[in-house]
Image (cartoon, rainbow, N blue to C red):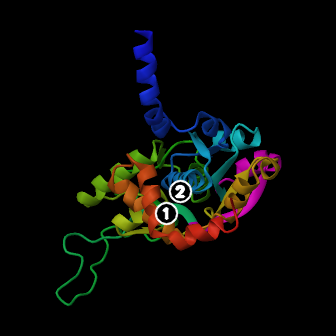
């Protein structure tokens, strides 16, 4: 019996090596911890970076999803190696003041980001008249200052996301600055916000939400930012990559890749649209697809790296 077992093990050993690989290789792989939050833009950056690090540089990447402040704290305390989701200079200004001195800012990985209050930009029924002209949107508010005039139509509600997000703090400041004391900021999540937005558009109901670009919802629906004459939301921003001190010395190629990682809002939106179409179930597959369709961009990130 013992001889038979040895023969079976001997015959199966090549197959075991084929499917599991050399155990020493697994032990030697660099483990990179990336923190991100449940915003579509953050999901996009984290998963594309994960795919490149794993498929091209041979690392093992652990993604840590958490609330915005926890994400900052994790990198500052060294529990995460990096994050690619720091909205600066305004949205995450509070977190930057608190934790920025404990990490290294590698600069923007995406320029032209924006946050603010968003409404549907569609008309009732057909979107063009018989002459081909675009019909007037059913929501007549043009700026945040107009919300006071249309409180009844909006039911005194601004539909938001998770309470710790920087956009929520800016919205609270906007309610005070514009004297919108009768409005309530509804806390929830990105998923619940986009679900309410979808329902309101289907029924041509008035709704105002906390919104940002890049985001897949701008590709799915016609939306517009309300003007912000007091500049509470500060116009355009950048999304930065932040890493823990010592990463350059510990993982030079990983640091070099993260330092080079940068893409356009349109490139990021491509991933987000694909991911949302699949209900966000298989983001790594979408990241691999993105890599295949943006080979030159990926090659630029990796030039000269091992």
Q: Which residue is mark 2?
A: 48
Residue 110 lies within the magenta run: yes
Q: Which residue is mark 1?
A: 291
Crowd tier of the residue under label 1, counting other residues whose Cα lies within 10 Å: few below 14, some 14–19, many 20 or above: some
In percent of width and height, residue 173 lies at 62, 53
Crowd tier of the residue under label 2, counting other residues whose Cα lies within 10 Å: few below 14, some 14–19, many 20 or above: many
In percent of width and height, residue 104 lies at 79, 53
Q: Quadrant of the N terminus?
A: top left
Query: For the magenta stretch, what is the residue range?
Result: 91-113
User: Is residue 14 visible in the rendered structure shown here?
Assistant: yes
Q: In the image as oriented, which residue stretches furthest toward the top?
A: 1
Q: Please name which of the two marks, 1 or 2, marks the residue nearer to the observer.
A: 1
Q: Assess whether mark 2 and mark 1 are in contact (beta carbons under 8 angstroms).
A: yes
Residue at the image point whose x is 60% and y is 50% from the top: 58
Q: Give how far apart the Cα atoms at labels 1 and 2 are.
A: 8 Å
Placement of 295 over or under 23, stated as above or below: below
Q: Secondary structure at mark 2?
A: helix
Q: Earlier in the sequence, mark 1 or mark 2?
A: 2
Placement of 38 over or under 232, stated as above or below: above
User: Is residue 209 visible in the rendered structure shown here?
Assistant: no
Q: Is residue 118 left or right of residue 202?
A: right
Residue at the image point whose x is 82% and y is 50% from the top: 249
């Amino acid at each position: 019996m013992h001889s038979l077992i040895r023969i079976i093990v001997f015959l199966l050993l090549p197959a075991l090596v084929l499917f599991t690989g050399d155990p020493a290789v697994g032990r030697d792989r660099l483990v990179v911890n990336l923190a991100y939050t449940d915003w579509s833009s953050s999901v996009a950056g984290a998963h594309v970076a994960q795919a490149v690090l794993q498929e091209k540089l041979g690392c093992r990447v652990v993604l840590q999803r958490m609330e915005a402040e926890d994400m900052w704290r994790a990198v500052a305390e060294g529990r995460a190696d990096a994050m690619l989701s720091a909205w600066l200079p305004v949205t995450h200004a509070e977190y930057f003041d608190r934790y920025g001195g404990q990490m290294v800012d590698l600069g923007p990985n995406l320029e032209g980001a924006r946050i603010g209050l968003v409404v549907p930009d569609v008309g009732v029924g057909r979107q063009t008249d018989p002459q081909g002209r675009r019909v007037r949107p059913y929501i007549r508010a043009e700026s945040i200052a107009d919300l006071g005039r249309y409180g009844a139509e909006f039911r005194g509600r601004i539909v938001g996301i998770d309470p710790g997000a920087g956009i929520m703090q800016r919205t609270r400041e906007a309610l005070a600055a514009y004297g919108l004391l009768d409005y309530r900021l509804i806390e929830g999540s990105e998923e619940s916000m986009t679900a309410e937005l979808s329902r309101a558009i289907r029924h041509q109901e008035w709704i105002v939400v906390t919104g940002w670009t890049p985001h897949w919802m701008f590709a799915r629906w016609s939306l517009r930012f309300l003007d912000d004459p007091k500049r509470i939301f500060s116009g355009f921003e950048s999304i930065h990559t932040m890493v823990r001190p010592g990463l350059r010395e510990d993982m030079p190629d990983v640091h070099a890749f993260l330092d080079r990682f940068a893409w356009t809002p349109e490139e990021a939106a491509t991933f987000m649209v694909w991911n949302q179409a699949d209900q966000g179930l298989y983001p790594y597959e979408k990241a691999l697809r993105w890599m295949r369709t943006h080979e030159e961009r990926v090659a630029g990130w990796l030039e000269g790296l091992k």
